[in-house]
Image (tube, rainbow, N blue to C red):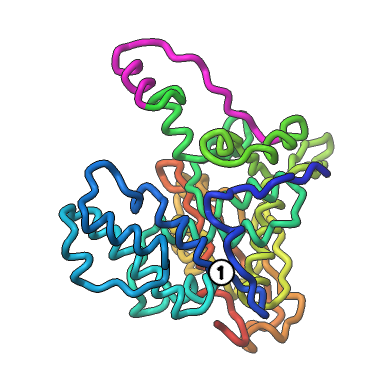
């Protein structure tokens, strides 16, 4: 499709407040840190004490200033103090690393500081938004949400559908009406149906025009593999779907790998792996990591776990010399699976840590 977004989308993650260095990696501006200070976890509230108000004002004026232990100890609220300590630790780690990318990769190294999952998701959101800034395709943008938003996956009439778990759970609890809706549900009232749409040609321009919040995340991505029709005489006709959420996700992951590692890869969705020389695999989430490990080792995998596997992918390096010598020229298989509860939390960091690179980060 050709309807590109006319304004920055996902603006709440601050991607437009990041500068590119010579490598193309992103370094924060003061405006980026001010946006963090306005988040609900750090913003002032009516109950904020004088010490918290003073520090908040000082940081808004100079977001990278040093903060003393005494300034934090003066906070009356323990949660506010803890939130500011987490933020300042994160801020200082990014500044020391020199870029969001370097800091993000370093967070997963042994001995690194502990970073809240929310912080990691916001970093990934900003990174993928800049990776896709010239991308006009709605399916790529929706697939990119999987890198930083937990999904709830369901199978309906043979279709594998991935929706934002936070939005779906909220709609289930409140009908999309927030606290009022929750109270109505508790009182037994019937709520109006809220439209959850599967991304398609008819609504893709509207998806791209949306900006943020629940309205943006109401769109469901179809992760169904190619459709196969069984024909007489044992023949099978494979019909390639023109709009594939799996192919869109693969294209986003290709950009992710190239941005961090500087190597070109091709990622292709696969319905199955029939490779007697299977040498390397990477799970894109906790469930697929455990599943692929068991399959690789020859351990028995029951049918219920197999049904949770959403897709496999074949990753190939454009230049085999970018791979480790012992697996050079061999494909790398990726897995994507939901947990027993139908939830999927993709871990893009696995593609930073576990690829067989000749020159790892």
Name the residue: 65% across, 71% down: 259
Q: Taking 345 as reference, is 62 above or below it?
A: below
Name the residue: 64% across, 37% down: 210
User: Is residue 347 covered in magenta?
Assistant: no
Relative side of 256 to 92, left or right: right
Q: Position of residue 335 (x, y in %)?
A: 56, 59
Q: Is residue 132 visible?
A: yes
In the foreground, 322 or 17? 17
Q: Position of residue 285 (x, y in %)?
A: 48, 58
Q: How many marks?
A: 1
Q: Position of residue 37 (x, y in %)?
A: 40, 56
Q: Quadrant of residue 172?
A: top left
Range drawn in magenta: 179-199
- The residue singled out by tag 1 in the image is 351
Q: Secondary structure at mark 1?
A: helix
The N terminus - image quarter: top right
Q: Quadrant of residue 66?
A: bottom left
In the foreground, 234 or 81? 81
The C terminus - image quarter: bottom right
In the foreground, 316 or 7? 7
Rate crowding at label 1 as few (under 14), some (14 to 19) or many (20 or more) other CA atoms within 10 Å.
some
Relative side of 352 to 46, left or right: right
Name the residue: 63% across, 33% down: 158
Relative side of 141 to 125, left or right: right
Q: Taking 231 as reference, is 264 above or below it?
A: below
Q: Is residue 277 visible?
A: no
User: Is residue 189 covered in magenta?
Assistant: yes
Q: Position of residue 146 (x, y in %)?
A: 56, 50
């Amino acid at each position: 499709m050709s309807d590109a977004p006319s304004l920055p989308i996902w603006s709440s993650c601050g991607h437009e407040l990041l500068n590119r260095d010579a490598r193309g990696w992103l370094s924060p501006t003061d405006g980026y840190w001010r946006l963090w200070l306005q988040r609900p976890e750090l913003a002032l509230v009516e109950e904020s004490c004088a010490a918290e108000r003073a520090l908040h004002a000082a940081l808004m004026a100079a977001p990278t200033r040093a903060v003393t232990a005494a300034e934090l100890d003066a906070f009356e609220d323990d949660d506010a103090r803890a939130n500011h300590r987490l933020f300042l630790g994160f801020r200082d780690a990014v500044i020391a690393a020199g870029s969001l990318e370097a800091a993000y990769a370093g967070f997963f190294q042994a001995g690194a500081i502990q970073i809240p999952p929310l912080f990691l998701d916001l970093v990934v959101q900003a990174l993928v938004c800049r990776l896709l800034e010239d991308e006009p395709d709605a399916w790529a943008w929706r697939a990119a949400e999987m890198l930083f938003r937990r999904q709830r996956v369901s199978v309906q009439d043979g279709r594998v559908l991935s929706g934002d778990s936070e939005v779906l759970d909220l709609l289930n609890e409140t009908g999309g009406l927030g606290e009022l809706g929750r109270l109505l549900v508790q009182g037994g009232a019937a709520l109006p149906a809220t439209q959850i749409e599967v991304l398609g040609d008819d609504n893709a321009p509207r998806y791209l025009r949306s900006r943020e919040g629940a309205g943006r995340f109401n769109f469901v991505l179809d992760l169904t593999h190619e459709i196969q029709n069984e024909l007489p005489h044992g023949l099978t006709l494979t019909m390639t779907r023109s709009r594939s959420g799996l192919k869109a996700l693969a294209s986003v992951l290709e950009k992710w790998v190239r941005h961090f590692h500087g190597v070109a890869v091709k990622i292709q969705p696969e319905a199955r792996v029939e490779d007697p020389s299977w040498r390397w695999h990477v799970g894109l989430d906790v469930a697929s990591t455990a599943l692929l490990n068991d399959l690789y080792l020859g351990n028995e995998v029951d049918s219920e776990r197999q049904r949770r596997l959403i897709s496999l992918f074949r990753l190939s390096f454009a230049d085999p010399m970018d791979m480790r010598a012992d697996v050079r020229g061999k494909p790398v298989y990726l897995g994507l699976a939901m947990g027993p509860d139908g939830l999927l939390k993709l871990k893009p960091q696995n593609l930073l840590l576990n690829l067989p690179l000749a020159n790892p980060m």
